[in-house]
Image (cartoon, rainbow, N blue to C red):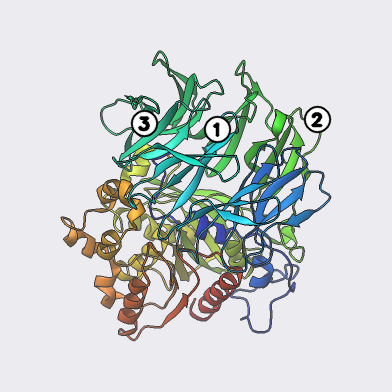
Amino acid sequence: MSIRAFTLFCLLAPFLAACSQEQQSSSATETASEPTAAVETTPSIPEYSIDDFMNSTRFLGASFSPDNSKLLVSNNSTGIFNVYAIAADGSGSEQLTDSDSDAMLAISYFPEDERFLYTADQGGNELNHLYVRELDGSAIDLTPGENLKASFAGWSGDYESFYVQSNERDPRFFDVYEYQVAEGYPREMIFLNEEGFFPAQVSPDGQSIVLVELITANNNNLYLQNLASGDRTDLTPHEGDVSSSPSDFSPDSQWLYYTTDEGSEYQHLMRYEIVSGEKEEVLSLDWDIYYGVFSREGNYFVAAANVDARTELMMFDAETMEQIDAPTIEGANVTSVRFSHGDDMLALYGSGSRFPSDLFVTPVSGGEEPMRLTNSLNANIDAAHLVDAEVVRFASYDGVEIPGVLYVPHGASEDNKAPALVWVHGGPGGQTRATYSGLIQYLVNHGYVVYGINNRGSSGYGKTFFAMDNQQHGEADLGDVVASKQMLIDTGVVDPDKVGIIGGSYGGYMVVAALAFEPEVFNVGVDIFGVTNWVRTLESIPPWWTAQKDALYDEMGDPATDRERLERISPLFHAENIVKPMIVLQGANDPRVLQVESDEMVAAVRRNDVHVDYIVFPDEGHGFRNRDNEIQGYRAIREFLDRYL
């Protein structure tokens, strides 16, 4: 993901993970406690319960063990993410952590033994620590302390140490430490961050670090700093708005690969020779290049592009840069790969509209179908009963072409019109992807058309499109959302009197903004962890966001100088306009959208004598991590929609 697409309020892992939940067991038909379907469905298509969808299993991560016999992953089969080892031959798996409260997310095996690194926060507060699980099963917090946030930042080139970013010294900025693999894990600070950079990769030889200076959401600088001398080089001098993002060092540390939109609408892949300072283009398309990275041993180079809301993977011989066949999975979109020790094997994730992301392994040499290691979709659900995502575009209120992803239930037709929901992604600056979403498929399975709009300001469609909503949030982008209703009606399968709006985080803000500023357009609103008071939100950002605060203020507005506009676009200050029912989901531990925001919004709308369902989850932050909470929340959403839409 480019720095330009680094969306400060997007739920990313929490909400997007929840909405693509991949789960496992439960009844195949709707439970008696759940409401009937919103629209008549084809008789051969059963209605699945929210338990069915949420009881699929979601898998994350893939790190090969030293002997390549296992893969370290996380999954939520117990209802909360824990760490597991999956046999690379498909013979089984072993649970390695046993949390029933905080999500444990796998990072990496150690290079020479089966110790491993993992991360966890506390109840969704986003204050992650980094842990090592020893061979005897004991766990060590490598980043102890209160109110700090730490993250793994990669292995050294010789795999004898690893890097960790932490804001323990100054809650505003992340310093970089090098930890030795040796007993006791001694560490040394290698980069003191006093200027608010985003530290990125350390070169394999340990001599250099890449730093990102975020100026605005559309403009940043990349620097290369010598860790011994402290000398710093500007890699991307430019005029105007240019967004660049570091991607990888070459294995010999002679080149830095990075993506940039300099001179282009889209992110293309460049490389910079560290000794000479020369640059050359490596790869460009009429779509954003996500990244270009080397394999573990440096034999291969893999690049990925964001092609019309889907990931397109490309693979090259690293020595000649000749393109070779990338792995494919029939009926799936390959989204990521991880190489084994020796570069002989590939672990890859693949998913489709009808099934969640699953883990596969295959020889790099190809010649055989990848072997599936996981079956994440609940066995009670027949994937044939789900629906495919279709990319659909329409002309908005001013003629700008707006893309989005449409899901239409079986049985919806001109003679059997369905209620519909406009789904607004998080951000600002996220993107709805043409992939699996458990919540969307659940709603579609019960008769709702869902359109995941990529309104102006979304990433993936060029820098001009991305910048179109700057300082116009809740106005220019809201206009697209409103205009999408007519597109849905024009499909001929949507009931024009039954169109609602749903979204999480920034998308939740758009939901409430639509109800406040266009009160007659949508019949209902579903706000999931959404902002409603930009003044408070921007004044109470977490301290670890200090480095991107100026960029956030440039995009949204500075509460010290733009208070009037921020109040104008904040639904809380216009709650008296809301006349349509809504449901609000909120995490009590949310550091981004404080609970008081939703408390005040709900109270204000109820004073209008308008119905509001309000659910606060005491052990969640900005999005769902606990599957029982997801089930409760999503069941409540559908009950609300069936009743009011």
Residue 85 location, x and y as percent?
A: 73, 51
SS of the residue under disc 3: strand
Q: Is residue 170 left or right of residue 343?
A: left
Residue 386, placed above or below residue 470: below
| Rendered location of residue 505, percent (x, y) | 42, 61
Residue for point 45% across, 29% down:
258
Who's the residue at 58% across and 54% down the image?
A: 140
Q: Nearer the viewer, mark 2 or mark 3?
A: 3
Real-space Cα distance between discs 1 and 2? 33 Å
Using the image as rendered, state which of residue 80 and residue 9 is in the foreground: 80
Q: Amino acid at mark 1?
A: Ser
Q: Nearer the viewer, residue 142 or 204?
A: 142
In which image quadrant can residue 614 be found? Answer: bottom left
Picture quarter containing residue 587? Answer: bottom left
Q: Residue 367: which disc?
A: 2
- The answer to whether the residues at label 1 and label 3 have Cβ atoms under 8 Å apart is no
- Visible in this render: residue 244? no
Task: Give the secondary structure at mark 2.
Answer: loop
- Residue 187 numbered tag: none
Query: What residue is pinned by disc 1?
Result: 156
- The mark that comes first in sequence, 1 or 2, is 1
- Disc 2 versus disc 3: distance between alpha carbons? 41 Å
Which residue: 61% across, 34% down? 313
